[in-house]
């Protein structure tokens, strides 16, 4: 059997494979919530009662299939929709791909109603806000995901606020399809140009540790001091030669967090993906490695097989619907 070694064109073509005809276009939203114990307002830990595992177990009784890492229930999935955990237990719904804003609104409303009803039964509140308003970084419980252990050790080497980003921020994002490389370029450039407007319009993180912090979006401040290799504003989006290839070149030079093999994570020790491709031992690079690496950069605009527009602080149902409407009209 002939084995074709992964090359840079394969990586670029991974993004091209996301091209859809306009008739297939949709809009999706992803949004996060902080969960607090009603008795003491502490953030829910994984194994407490109420706790994050318990929340996932109760939600699973609806339509969801469980996703485990070892013995730990870490996510739920159903028909292209997922509920996942951010490092500090922020509960994230990555919604479906819908034809209209009205449908994503209905999906979000149902999710929030289910979460509210569950909170009444189990004894927790959900709060959609961009930055943790009550607790210090060291007060936040961590979720039992191996991926986050590597990120936790890496973040302090790159910026002062990376651990705050992981545990004390929540956001809304909108996902859009594209019909060609040129269509992707146009949407990415417009979205990048309007990010500061979106950050201002949807600013919702003015409190830190029970006091005003002097910002309307402290979450945006946190991102500015997280990791310049993989976060923030990307000027090359406005270059004349911007496209799938230049995005691929950007990602090739971003340090990897880890390599995932046989259900285990191995540290990459700062090796870039470009360096990884030049090595064949102990692991041969695969397209699955690339798919993982794509998810470990966090700029304002992120290209996958669709465009993620990531600049808004977390907010309630109205803000989630408004952000979707802002981007699609």
Image: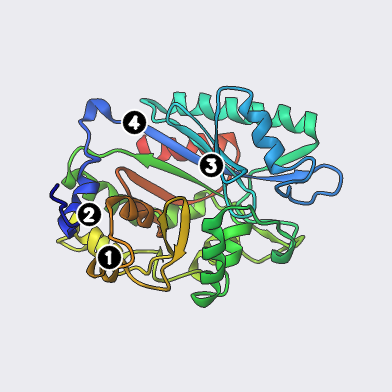
Q: Please identify the residue farthest to the left as the structure is shown.
A: 2
Q: State the separation of the CA atoms marked 1 and 2.
A: 9 Å
Q: Quadrant of the C terminus?
A: top left
Residue 24 figure quarter = top left
- Say if mark 2 contacts mark 4, CB within 8 Å: no
- Which of the labelled discs sits on residue 17, or is there none? none
- Say if mark 4 contacts mark 1, CB within 8 Å: no
User: Dot 4, how many residues are within 10 Å of its Cα: few (below 14), some (14-19), or many (20+)?
Assistant: some
- Which of the labelled discs sits on residue 252, or is there none? 1
Q: State the separation of the CA atoms marked 2 and 4.
A: 24 Å
Lateral position of residue 23 relative to residue 326, left or right: left
User: Dot 2, how many residues are within 10 Å of its Cα: few (below 14), some (14-19), or many (20+)?
Assistant: many
Question: Residue at (57%, 70%) from the top-left corner?
Answer: 161
Q: State the separation of the CA atoms marked 2 and 3.
A: 28 Å
Residue bearing mark 4: 26
Circle 2 or circle 3, nearest the eye:
2
Circle 2 or circle 4, nearest the eye:
2
Q: State the separation of the CA atoms marked 4 and 1.
A: 29 Å
- Which of the labelled discs sits on residue 31, or is there none? 3
- Give how far across and how far down residue 83 sits, in percent: 54, 37
Circle 4 or circle 1, nearest the eye:
1
Label 2 vs 4, first from the N-terminus: 2
- Give how far across and how far down residue 216 sits, in percent: 60, 59
Q: State the separation of the CA atoms marked 3 and 4.
A: 17 Å
Is residue 243 visible in the rendered image? The answer is no
- Say if mark 1 contacts mark 2, CB within 8 Å: yes
């Amino acid at each position: 059997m002939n084995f074709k070694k992964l090359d840079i064109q394969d990586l670029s073509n991974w993004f091209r494979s996301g091209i859809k005809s306009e008739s297939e276009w949709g809009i999706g939203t992803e949004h996060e919530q902080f969960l607090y114990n009603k008795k003491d307002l502490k953030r829910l830990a994984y194994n407490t009662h109420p706790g994050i595992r318990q929340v996932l177990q109760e939600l699973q009784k609806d339509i969801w299939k469980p996703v485990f890492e070892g013995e730990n229930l870490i996510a739920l999935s159903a028909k292209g929709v997922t509920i996942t955990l951010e490092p500090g237990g922020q509960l994230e719904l990555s919604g479906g791909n819908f034809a209209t804003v009205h449908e994503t609104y209905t999906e979000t409303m149902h999710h929030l109603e289910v979460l509210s009803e569950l909170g009444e039964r189990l004894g927790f509140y959900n709060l959609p806000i961009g930055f943790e308003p009550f607790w210090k970084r060291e007060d936040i419980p961590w979720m039992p995901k191996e991926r986050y252990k590597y990120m936790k050790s890496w973040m302090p080497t790159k910026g002062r606020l990376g651990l705050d980003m992981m545990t004390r921020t929540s956001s809304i994002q909108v996902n859009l399809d594209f019909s060609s490389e040129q269509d992707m370029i146009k949407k990415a450039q417009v979205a990048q140009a309007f990010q500061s407007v979106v950050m201002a319009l949807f600013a919702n993180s003015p409190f830190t540790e029970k006091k005003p912090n002097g910002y309307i979006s402290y979450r945006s401040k946190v991102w500015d001091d997280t990791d310049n290799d993989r976060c923030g504003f990307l000027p090359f989006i406005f270059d004349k030669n911007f496209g799938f290839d230049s995005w691929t070149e950007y990602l090739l030079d971003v340090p990897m967090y880890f390599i995932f093999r046989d259900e285990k994570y191995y540290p990459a020790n700062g090796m870039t993906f470009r360096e990884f491709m030049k090595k064949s031992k102990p692991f041969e690079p695969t397209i699955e490695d690339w798919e993982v690496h794509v998810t470990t950069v966090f700029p304002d605009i992120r290209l996958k097989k669709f465009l993620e527009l990531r600049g808004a602080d977390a907010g309630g149902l109205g803000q989630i619907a408004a952000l979707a409407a802002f981007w699609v009209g």
